[in-house]
């Protein structure tokens, strides 16, 4: 992923249309690796937590994980890998609807930018993603509104309904503040994974 100055766009995840309780939850953690092959600048990764896929009520699930230490990442072979695999081995079809929970690694001082969209699609795709929720620092989930992410938000989730086979060019931007641990100054950024979110074999 690349990191760039935060320049917001008009593209958003559609409101409402949440998947029902009992839908599969897929949990991923966004983390950073500061030393990759001797290069001293951040590389961003998506890693899997130790928790198994679940069909738990998502509001109870995010409240449970909010203060859990996230695991050290397995560093992939290239800085551009950002795989979120399917759940075919866990009882769900590869292109089965599910809820994606995205958590920021607790080892770092960062949060979704307060007042921002938190997560925004690169391309508007009708009927594929909906119901973005922000989870506050107390573990309470809130549907996304024009007010944006609450201060201290490190977890978001949304419903993924489909990924048509052969359709490419999707992908998301993550609107995140890096926080200086001494001054507490926030640096708004967009983490921009330059990897297409292709359909047909996995979600997302």
Image (tube, rainbow, N blue to C red):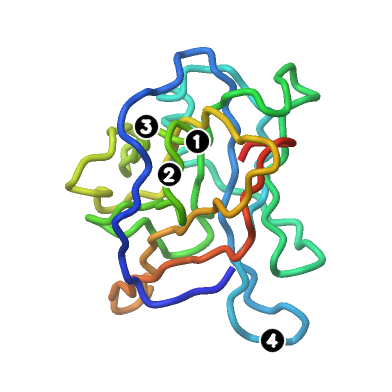
Q: Quadrant of the N terminus?
A: bottom right
Circle 3 Cα neighbour tier, 10 Å, few/some/many (<14 / 14–19 / ≥20): some
Neighbours of disc 1 within 10 Å: few (<14), some (14-19), many (20+): some
Mark closest to the chain's N terminus, 1 or 3: 1
Of pointers 4 and 3, the one earlier in the residue sequence: 4
Q: Residue furthest left?
A: 147
Which residue is identified by label 2?
155
Residue 39 - label: 4
Q: Nearer the viewer, residue 120 or 198?
A: 198
Name which of mark 1 and mark 4 comes first in the sequence.
Answer: 4
Looking at the image, residue 118 lies above or below residue 132: below
- Give the CA distance from mark 1 to mark 3: 20 Å
Mark 1 falls on what kind of element?
helix
Labels 1 and 2: the sequence-earlier one: 1
Q: Is residue 79 above or below residue 105?
A: below
Query: Distance from label 1 to label 4 (Cα)?
Result: 32 Å
- Closest to the camera, between mark 1 and mark 4, is 4
Q: Name the residue at 64% across, 23% down.
A: 96
Q: Which of marks 2 and 4 precedes in the sequence?
A: 4
Dot 3 lies on which element?
strand
Q: Which residue is mark 3?
A: 131
């Amino acid at each position: 992923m690349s990191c760039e100055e935060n320049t917001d766009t008009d593209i958003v995840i559609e409101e409402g249309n949440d998947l029902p309780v009992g839908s599969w939850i897929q949990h991923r953690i966004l983390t950073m690796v500061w030393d990759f092959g001797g290069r001293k600048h951040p590389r961003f990764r998506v890693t899997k937590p130790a928790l198994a896929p679940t069909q738990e009520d998502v509001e109870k699930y995010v409240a449970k994980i909010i203060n859990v230490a996230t695991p050290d990442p397995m560093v992939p072979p290239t800085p551009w890998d950002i795989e979120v695999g399917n759940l075919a081995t866990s009882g769900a079809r590869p292109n089965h609807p599910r809820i994606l929970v995205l958590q920021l690694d607790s080892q770092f001082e960062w949060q979704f930018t307060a007042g921002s969209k938190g997560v925004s699609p690169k391309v508007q795709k009708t009927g594929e993603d909906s119901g973005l929720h922000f989870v506050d620092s107390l573990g309470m989930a809130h549907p996304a509104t024009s007010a944006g992410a609450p201060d201290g938000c490190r977890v978001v989730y949304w419903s993924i309904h489909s990924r048509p086979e052969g359709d490419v060019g999707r992908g998301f931007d993550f609107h995140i503040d890096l926080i200086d641990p001494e001054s507490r100054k926030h640096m708004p950024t967009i983490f921009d994974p330059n990897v297409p979110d292709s359909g047909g074999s996995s979600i997302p």
